[in-house]
Image (spheres, grey):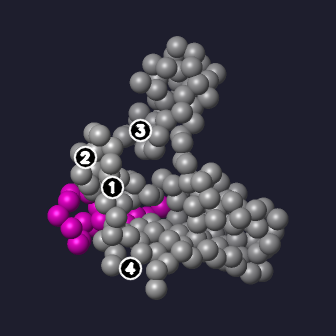
């Protein structure tokens, strides 16, 4: 649908995930470039204030902690999907057939924040996922490590089966650190 709209001269905003395969994502980007149209993935948490990202990004931009060299993002919850919509599919974010899983759900938001906050390009990404702790086929736990070209690293941990809720964004720089922690005690 995005490619069809781009070919008809429309600018396109898509939700994450942008596409289900890298090939489809690349076709979307190539079509947007060829048609000279904007193609934007709506990573709403960059703009929502979640984890006080705006404040942390401002501190980074002003050099408040020097050169950032390690990022830690964490989202731990026992949450499993949105309720209330008339066409709600129970626990849709937990099921592969509906694009579910902890990494597929929250990973794009955290990676978007990292790529927006850190100037260097990623050079390697490693992820581990499992479905421990629940009956669904989507991953319930995910851990991602990203290495950047300038030597910085990032660690992302996501769980939908944690007995304790936590949301954390912590950036360590060569002249200090900044941390926002929204955890339950």
Nearest to N terminus: mark 3 or mark 1: 3
Circle 3 residues within 10 Å: few <14, some 14–19, many ≥20: some
Percent coordinates x, y for residue 4 in the rendering: 45, 19
Numbered mark located on residue 81 in the image: 1
Nearest to N terminus: mark 4 or mark 3: 3
Q: Residue at x 49, y 20 (%)?
A: 5
Circle 4 residues within 10 Å: few <14, some 14–19, many ≥20: few
Numbered mark located on residue 106 in the image: none
Q: CA distance from mark 4 to mark 3?
A: 32 Å
Residue toward you, 158 or 44: 44
Q: CA distance from mark 1 to mark 2?
A: 9 Å
Q: Would you name the residue on which mark 3 appears?
A: 19
Query: Can you tell which of label 2 and label 3 is closer to the viewer?
Result: 2
Nearest to N terminus: mark 4 or mark 1: 1
Q: Is residue 104 left or right of residue 11?
A: left
Disc 4, disc 3: CB below 8 Å?
Answer: no
Disc 1, disc 2: CB below 8 Å?
Answer: yes
The stretch in magenta equals 124-142
Q: Would you name the residue on which mark 2 appears?
A: 89
Residue toward you, 45 or 184: 184
Q: Residue at x 74, y 81 (%)?
A: 176
Nearest to N terminus: mark 2 or mark 3: 3
Percent coordinates x, y for residue 128 in the rendering: 35, 67
* 84 is within the stretch colored magenta: no
Disc 2, disc 3: CB below 8 Å?
Answer: no
């Amino acid at each position: 649908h995005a490619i069809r709209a781009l070919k008809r001269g429309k600018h396109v905003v898509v939700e994450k995930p942008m596409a289900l395969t890298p090939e489809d994502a690349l076709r979307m980007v190539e079509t947007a470039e060829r048609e000279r149209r904007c193609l934007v993935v709506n990573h709403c948490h960059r703009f929502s204030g979640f984890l006080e990202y705006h404040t942390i990004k401002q501190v980074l931009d002003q050099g408040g902690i020097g050169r950032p060299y390690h990022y830690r993002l964490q989202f731990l919850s026992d949450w499993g999907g949105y309720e209330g919509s008339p066409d709600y599919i129970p626990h849709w974010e937990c099921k592969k057939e509906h694009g579910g899983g902890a990494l597929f759900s929250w990973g794009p938001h955290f990676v978007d924040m990292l790529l927006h906050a850190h100037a260097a390009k990623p050079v390697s990404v490693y992820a581990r996922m499992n479905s421990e702790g629940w009956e669904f086929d989507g991953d319930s736990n995910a851990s991602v490590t990203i290495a950047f070209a300038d030597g910085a690293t990032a660690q992302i941990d996501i769980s939908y089966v944690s007995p304790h809720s936590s949301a954390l964004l912590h950036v360590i720089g060569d002249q200090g650190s900044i941390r926002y922690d929204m955890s339950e005690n």
